[in-house]
Image (cartoon, rainbow, N blue to C red):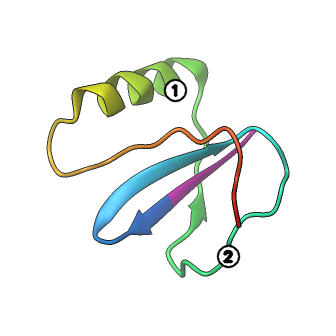
Amino acid sequence: MAVFYNHFQNEERFMILTTDECFCESCPYRMPVVLDESELEALVLFSKCGIGTKSYEILKKAIC
């Protein structure tokens, strides 16, 4: 599983890619992030809660 941390429109988003399909490289702030399973569960819960100004998205596929 490839995990990327993105800055997009002043929000922080985690993009979880379960395949090695094409991923847009246009964001200059893109950097790899490693999450274990417990952190991934917390990430899913945080995305449902919506606390603060951060927006987290779980993506099953990358779309170019």
Q: Predominant secondary structure in magenta?
A: strand
Seen at 59% across and 26% down, the residue is: 36
- Whole-percent x, y for residue 12 in the image: 36, 57
| Residue type indicated by callout 1 | Leu
Q: Secondary structure at mark 2?
A: loop
Q: Is-magenta flag for residue 2?
A: yes
Q: Which mark is residue 40?
A: 1
| Residue type indicated by callout 2 | Glu
Question: Is 44 left, or right, of 4 in this rendering?
Answer: left
Mark 1 neighbour density, 10 Å: few (under 14) some (14–19) many (20 or more): some
Disc on the earlier residue, 1 or 2: 2
Q: Residue furthest right?
A: 20
- Whole-percent x, y for residue 45 in the image: 35, 21
Mark 2 neighbour density, 10 Å: few (under 14) some (14–19) many (20 or more): few
Q: Count the marks.
A: 2
Residue 48 position by quadrant: top left
Q: Secondary structure at mark 1?
A: helix
The residue segment tinted magenta is: 1-5
Looking at the rendered image, the disc whose residue lies closer to the viewer, 1 or 2, is 2
User: Which residue is identified by label 2?
Assistant: 25
Q: Quadrant of the N terminus?
A: top right
Q: Is-magenta flag for residue 60?
A: no
Residue 51 position by quadrant: top left
11 w.r.t. 19: above or below: below
Q: Residue furthest front?
A: 63
Question: Is 9 left, or right, of 37 in this rendering?
Answer: left
- Whole-percent x, y for residue 35 in the image: 57, 34
Seen at 42% across and 30% down, the residue is: 43
